[in-house]
C-alpha cells in the first residue's frame, strides 16, 4: 500500500491536460460486450477501475489490449460467465455488466457492486428496469441473478434520477424487442457518451441528455471506434485546487459547457475564471466570499465535486453552506478536514463551513472524492507535509495525479506505507 505525501503552501501554476472520463469509461467498456465485433475506445484514462474492468472482460472471454490511450476490445468470443464475487466487488460500475450481459445473452449473474461505499447505494431502480423489460431477477447470497427468455421494450419511470439505472436500462433495452421509454432519466454527459457509442454500434437511442430516452431495440450490434469525453469531475477538481491554492492554472482538453455549475460557483466566490473553446483558466485571488452550494443531479453542481468544494470553502470569508441533495451523508472527508484545522459543522445533510487556516496532518481518504478533498486541503495548508492514506481510492479516479500536480509546481510524492 502507498500513501500520498503533499507539501502545502505552493500555488498551482501551469497547464493540466484532462483525461477521458472515468464514469464514461467504466460504462463504455461493458457496453462493448453488446457488440459482436471489435470496439475501440480512444482517450481511455489510466485508472484502477479501468484495469479491473479489463480483467472482468477477460473473465468473460473478451480479448482486451491497449495501444497508447486506446483500449481494443474484441467481444466476439464473450460468454455470460457467472461473476458472483471477485473483481465485481472492487468497483461500483460492475453493475453495468448486468445490463450488458442481459442484453447480449439474456442472462447474467453479477455480485453486488463495491467501490466507494460512503453510504448505502441501492440498485433497486436498475432491477425495476430489468424486470420491466421482462427479466426475472433474484438476489442469491449477494449475487444478482437475471434471466429473460425475451427482453421486451417497456415504459419505465425511474423513482429516483439515477445515472447507473439509466445507463443499465439503455444497455439491456438496446437489444430488447420493441421500444423502451425511460422517464425521469438522468441527464449527465456520460449518459450521452454511452448512447453515442451504442448508436455507433447500431443501436437506436434518442433523447439521451434529456429526461425522456427512447430506445428502439435492434437484433444485433457491431463494433465501432469511439472517443471518450473528458472527465468533468477531474477537471472540476483541478479548477477547485487552483482556486484553493490561489494559483493560475489552465485546465485543458475539456468541454467548458460541462463545467458551468462549477464555473458559476467559483465566479460567485470571487475566483477569476476565463473560458476558452476547450479549456478554462482559473486565476486564484487573495480573498473569497462564502457561498451556498447545492449538489444536485446534472446540470446542477455535481455531488462528486462536493467534497473537493468543501476544502475550497474553508478559504472563503464568512459562512458557506454546502448541501448534498444526491447523497444524504457523503461527508466522510469532514472529520479529516477538521483534523487539518477546518471549521466545519454538519447540520442534517448540510455542511456549515467557516474560514479556516489549514495545517498539514496525517489523514485518511475513505473514498475517492474524500481523497481529492484531502489532497486539495493538503496543497492549501500553510506549510508542512501531509500524509494521506487510502491512496487506492484516489487512484480510482485521478489519472496521473502525482505527475500532473508536480507539473503544476506542487511537491507531492507516493511513499510505501510501513
Ligand atoms: C460509476 C458512476 O457513474 N458513478 C457515479 C454515479 O453513481 P450511481 O449511478 O451509482 O449513482 P445514482 O445516480 O444511481 O445515484 C443517485 C441517487 O439515487 C439513489 N439510487 C440510485 C439507484 C437506485 O437504484 N436507487 C437509488 O435509490 C442513490 O442512493 C443516490 O442517492 O452517479 C453518482 C451521482 O451523480 C456519482 O456520484 C457517481 O460518481
Ligand atoms: C462515487 C464515485 O464513483 P463510483 O460511483 O464509481 O463509486 C465518484 O466517481 O465520485
Image: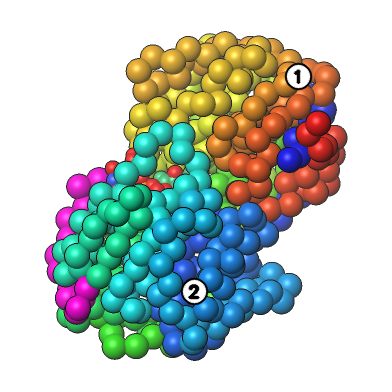
Residue 84 image-quadrant placement? bottom left
Residue 56, image x, y percentages: 53, 66
Residue 260 appears anywhere in the view: no
Please tell me whether residue 341 is drawn above or below residue 20 in the rendered image: above
Cα distance between the residues tagged 1 and 2:
45 Å
Q: Is-magenta flag for residue 228?
A: no
Residue 344, image x, y percentages: 52, 14
The answer to the question of whether label 1 and label 2 lie on touching residues, with beta carbons closer than 8 A, is: no
Residue drawn at x 76%, y 39% as measured from the top left: 2
Q: What stretch is highlighted in magenta?
A: 148-166
Residue 204, image x, y percentages: 30, 80
Q: Residue furthest front?
A: 141
Residue drawn at x 62%, y 31% as measured from the top left: 365
Residue 149 appears anywhere in the view: yes
Neighbor class of circle 2 (other Cα within 10 Å; few <14, some 14-19, many 20+) is some
In the image, 263 versus 398, the foreground residue is 398
Q: Is-magenta flag for residue 154?
A: yes
> In which quadrant is the C terminus drawn?
top right
Please tell me whether residue 35 is drawn above or below residue 343 in the rendered image: below
Q: What element carries label 1?
A: loop
In the image, 88 versus 208, the foreground residue is 88
Please tell me whether residue 14 is drawn above or below residue 290 in the rendered image: below
Q: Is the magenta stretch mostly helix, strand or loop?
A: loop
Q: Name the residue under label 1.
A: 360
Q: Mark 2 points at which residue?
A: 60
Please tell me whether residue 4 is drawn above or below residue 159 in the rendered image: above
Mark 2 C-beta to ligand 1 under 8 Å: no
Labels 1 and 2: the sequence-earlier one: 2
Residue drawn at x 68%, y 53% as measured from the top left: 399
Amino acid at each position: 500500500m502507498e500513501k500520498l505525501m503533499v507539501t502545502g503552501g505552493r500555488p498551482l501554476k501551469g497547464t493540466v491536460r484532462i483525461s477521458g472520463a472515468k464514469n464514461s469509461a467504466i460504462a463504455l467498456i461493458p457496453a462493448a460486450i453488446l457488440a459482436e465485433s471489435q470496439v475501440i475506445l480512444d482517450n481511455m484514462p489510466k485508472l484502477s477501475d479501468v484495469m479491473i474492468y479489463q480483467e472482468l472482460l477477460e473473465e468473460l472471454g473478451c480479448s482486451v489490449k491497449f495501444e497508447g490511450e486506446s483500449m481494443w476490445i474484441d467481444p466476439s468470443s464473450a460468454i455470460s460467465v457467472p461473476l458472483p464475487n471477485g473483481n465485481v466487488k472492487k468497483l461500483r460500475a460492475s453493475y453495468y455488466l448486468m445490463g450488458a450481459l442481459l442484453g447480449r445473452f439474456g442472462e447474467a449473474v453479477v455480485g453486488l457492486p463495491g467501490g466507494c461505499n460512503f453510504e448505502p447505494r441501492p440498485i433497486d431502480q436498475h432491477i425495476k428496469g430489468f424486470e420491466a423489460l421482462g427479466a426475472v431477477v433474484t438476489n442469491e447470497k449477494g449475487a444478482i441473478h437475471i434471466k429473460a427468455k425475451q427482453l421486451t421494450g417497456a415504459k419505465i419511470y425511474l423513482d429516483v434520477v439515477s445515472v447507473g439505472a439509466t445507463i443499465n436500462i439503455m444497455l439491456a433495452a438496446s437489444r430488447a424487442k420493441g421500444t423502451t421509454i425511460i422517464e425521469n432519466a438522468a441527464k449527465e454527459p456520460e449518459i450521452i457518451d454511452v448512447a453515442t457509442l451504442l448508436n455507433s454500434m447500431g443501436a437506436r437511442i434518442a433523447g439521451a441528455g434529456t429526461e425522456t430516452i427512447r430506445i428502439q431495440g435492434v437484433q444485433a450490434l457491431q463494433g465501432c471506434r469511439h472517443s471518450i469525453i473528458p472527465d468533468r469531475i477531474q477537471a472540476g477538481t483541478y479548477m477547485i485546487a487552483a482556486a484553493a491554492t490561489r494559483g493560475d492554472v489552465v485546465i485543458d482538453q475539456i468541454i467548458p459547457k460541462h463545467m458551468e455549475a462549477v464555473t458559476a460557483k467559483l465566479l460567485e466566490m470571487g475566483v477569476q475564471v476565463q473560458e476558452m473553446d476547450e479549456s478554462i483558466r482559473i486565476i486564484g485571488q487573495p480573498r473569497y466570499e462564502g457561498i451556498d452550494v447545492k449538489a444536485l443531479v446534472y446540470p446542477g453542481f455535481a455531488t462528486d465535486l462536493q467534497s473537493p468544494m468543501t476544502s475550497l470553502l474553508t478559504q472563503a470569508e464568512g459562512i458557506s453552506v454546502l448541501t448534498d441533495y444526491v447523497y444524504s451523508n457523503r461527508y466522510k472527508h469532514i472529520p479529516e478536514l477538521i483534523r487539518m484545522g477546518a471549521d466545519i459543522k454538519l447540520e442534517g445533510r448540510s455542511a456549515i463551513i467557516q474560514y479556516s487556516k489549514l495545517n498539514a496532518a496525517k489523514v485518511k481518504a475513505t473514498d475517492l472524492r474524500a481523497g481529492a478533498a484531502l489532497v486539495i486541503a493538503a496543497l492549501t495548508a500553510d506549510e508542512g507535509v501531509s500524509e494521506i492514506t487510502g491512496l487506492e481510492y484516489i487512484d480510482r479516479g485521478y489519472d496521473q495525479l502525482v505527475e500532473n500536480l508536480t507539473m503544476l509546481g506542487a511537491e507531492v510524492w507516493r511513499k510505501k506505507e510501513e
